[in-house]
């Protein structure tokens, strides 16, 4: 196998690893939300335990990227692809952390499931999940239209967060005995809001990979 074919094979292996890591993170989010809505402590514990696998993949992919950079000295598009992978794994790992944090709260939350008065949390979770799923798909499909759509949807998740903060304040006003529970749900909403931010970051790096532009600035 000549040098170019070997390098292409290594790039394909890198992409496959990144996709697997993304799948682990999206699965963790799906299970964390399911555990929250069903108050399933066992499922929540499985999410917490599984976070180590995502951390391990981050280190493995980082090693792949650094090896390619040192051995191959790639240029232009190839360099963008490797740089994108290095940036994306940070956000994917933090998505896994957020899933584990939501699961951790679920294991001790005092309410069973999401109170009807806080139903926006379920809707926010669905919107954030979809953003994460689509951000990974935008990389898999190299889809700039989908990437831009995910970025635009971040405002929706932010609006949910702001509304939930107000709803929680109103909830505490008439349920003072549930202050700790309200704080738990506020933390969950904050983690969901961060999921949207990480999805946006991933999509911005997909845009960089395909165009050389990052946040309207040419980098490479």
Image (cartoon, rainbow, N blue to C red):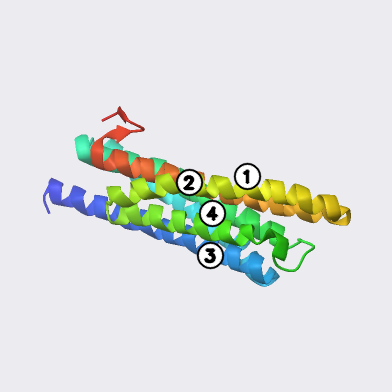
Give the residue at x 36% y 41%. Answer: 205
Give the residue at x 46% y 58%. Answer: 130
Residue linked to disc 4 = 96
Query: What is the CA distance from the residue labelled 4 to the residue labelled 1?
Result: 23 Å
Observer-nearest of 112 and 19: 112
In the rendered image of this protein, does residue 104 appear above or below residue 155?
A: below
Observer-nearest of 203 and 168: 168
Query: What is the CA distance from the residue labelled 3 to the residue labelled 1?
Result: 23 Å
Residue 141 in the image, given as x and y percentages of width and height: 28, 56
Query: What is the CA distance from the residue labelled 2 to the residue labelled 3?
Result: 19 Å
Pointer 2 or 3: first along the chain:
3
In the rendered image of this protein, does residue 150 appear above or below residue 118?
A: above
Q: Is residue 39 visible?
A: yes
Residue linked to disc 3 = 30
Pointer 4 or 2: first along the chain:
4
Pointer 4 or 3: first along the chain:
3
- Mark 2 or mark 3: which is in front? 2
- Mark 3 or mark 1: which is in front? 1
Pointer 4 or 1: first along the chain:
4
Which corner quadrant of the image does residue 67 belong to? top left
Q: Residues within 10 Å of mark 4 (few under 14, many from 20)?
A: many
In the rendered image of this protein, does residue 193 appear above or below residue 49?
A: above
Marker count (numbered) = 4
Residue linked to disc 1 = 162
Pointer 1 or 2: first along the chain:
2
Which corner quadrant of the image does residue 213 belong to? top left
Q: Residues within 10 Å of mark 3 (few under 14, many from 20)?
A: some
Numbered badge on residue 154: 2
Residue 178 in the image, given as x and y percentages of width and height: 84, 56
């Amino acid at each position: 196998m000549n040098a170019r074919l070997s390098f292409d094979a290594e790039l394909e292996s890198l992409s496959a690893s990144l996709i697997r890591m993304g799948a682990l993170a999206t699965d963790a989010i799906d299970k964390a939300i399911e555990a929250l809505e069903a108050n399933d402590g066992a499922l929540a514990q499985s999410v917490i335990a599984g976070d180590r696998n995502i951390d391990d993949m981050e280190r493995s992919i980082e090693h792949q990227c650094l090896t390619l950079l040192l051995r191959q000295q790639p240029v232009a598009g190839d360099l963008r692809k490797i740089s994108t992978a290095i940036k994306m794994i940070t956000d994917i790992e933090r998505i896994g952390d957020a899933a584990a944090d939501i699961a951790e709260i679920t294991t001790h939350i005092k309410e069973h499931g999401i109170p009807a008065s806080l139903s926006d949390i379920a809707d926010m979770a669905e919107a954030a999940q979809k953003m994460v799923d689509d951000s990974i798909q935008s990389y898999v499909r190299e889809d700039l239209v989908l990437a831009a759509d995910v970025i635009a949807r971040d405002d929706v998740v932010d609006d949910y967060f702001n509304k939930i903060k107000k709803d929680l304040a109103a909830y505490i006003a008439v349920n003072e005995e549930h202050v700790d529970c309200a704080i738990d749900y506020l933390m969950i909403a904050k983690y969901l809001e961060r999921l949207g931010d990480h999805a946006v970051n991933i999509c911005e790096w997909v845009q960089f990979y395909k165009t050389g532009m990052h946040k309207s600035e040419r980098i490479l």
